[in-house]
Amino acid sequence: MSVKILIIGNTDKASTSNHIESLLSRMADRAEIIGPCSHREIPKDAAGTADLCVVFGGDGTLLSVARNLAELGLPLLGINVGKLGFLAVWTIDDLVGHLDKILEQGIPYEDRIMFSVSLSTDGESGLYAANDVAVTSGEPFRMIDLCVDQGDRCIAQYLGDGLVVSTPTGSTGYNLSSGGPIIQPGVNAIVITPLSPHTLSLRPMVVGTRVPLKIIATDVNPGTTMIIDGQVHRPLKEGSSIEISVSDTLMRIVRHPSHEFFRTLAEKLQWGRSPHH
């Protein structure tokens, strides 16, 4: 039986169509192709029949596709047409060179946890987060006050510019930039990192995944916003609450045989590199 590969491209990047055409010309008769289609208009019915999804873009495109196709459990292979390429580490040559092995031996993916997010402001639920859920102070940029509970226990009151709640996948993103720890992708953990807390006693915290978290907006600004993966924005008001739980749905990332996690850290973020080299 032929393997069905869904091709998705970030149409905001001018070079995407050329990259896709290059791949298609080299994959003739090796697999059944669905698409290509834009990352903004993914045909869910067709995607549901695919065995593999190849995403042309950067990490942001891959995160967007991961959320949109979360319930399909489709392995995602990111071909980097962006800048950093921390998740989207493949090149066209990589994929073509490994395609036969992938088709013969199965698709080698690793599962990453995702968040299920609900917002009390308008009763919205069913949102997914692959990287993180952030709350930022917004205009007029006064300090905000957030209470974070784990089940029926209060973790802390966060007074500052907001906070970031991150998956292990997202720990190398906004969380890391805000002083949070790096978590290996396979670890079941949640990172809570305050943004410019107005105290010396609040630091990043790693908590378990079994009990949902709730963020309660005790005192916020008119511009205070919840942001999912840097892409989905929802306004908050005083009394709003955000519930974050680990979803039963997993993000599946196709492993690159030569891009092990710590090597990627070193190559992309200069992890462990001496400042003298």
Image (cartoon, rainbow, N blue to C red):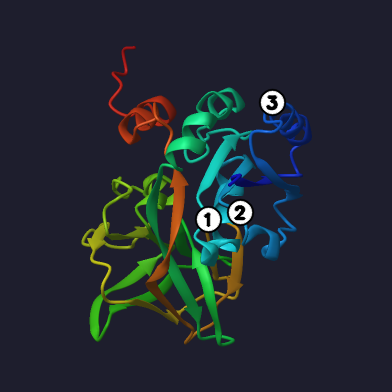
**Contact check, label 2 and label 1, Cβ < 8 Å:** yes
Q: Please name whichever residue, 220 or 130, is drawn nearer the observer in this view of the structure.
A: 130
In this rendering, which labeled residue sits more in front, label 3 or label 1? 3
> Horizontally, is 68 left or right of 271 in the view?
right
Does residue 91 appear in the picture of this structure? Answer: yes
Residue 262 x/y as whole percent: 31, 32
Residue name at image x 75 percent, y 50 percent: 38
Residue carrying label 3: 26
Residue 265 x/y as whole percent: 36, 32
Up the image or down, 236 lies above or below 273; here it is below
Residue carrying label 1: 74
Does label 3 or label 1 sit earlier along the sequence?
3
Residue 224 position by quadrant? bottom right
- Please rate how many residues cluster around mark 3, counting C-alpha atoms within 10 Å: few if below 14, some from 14 to 19, many from 20: few
Does residue 137 appear in the picture of this structure? Answer: no
Residue carrying label 2: 50
Does label 2 or label 1 sit earlier along the sequence?
2
Kindly identify the amino acid type of the residue bearing the numbered disc 3: Arg
Secondary structure under the numbered disc 2 in the rendered image: loop
**Contact check, label 2 and label 3, Cβ < 8 Å:** no
Up the image or down, 69 lies above or below 216; here it is above
Kindly identify the amino acid type of the residue bearing the numbered disc 1: Leu
- Please rate how many residues cluster around mark 1, counting C-alpha atoms within 10 Å: few if below 14, some from 14 to 19, many from 20: many
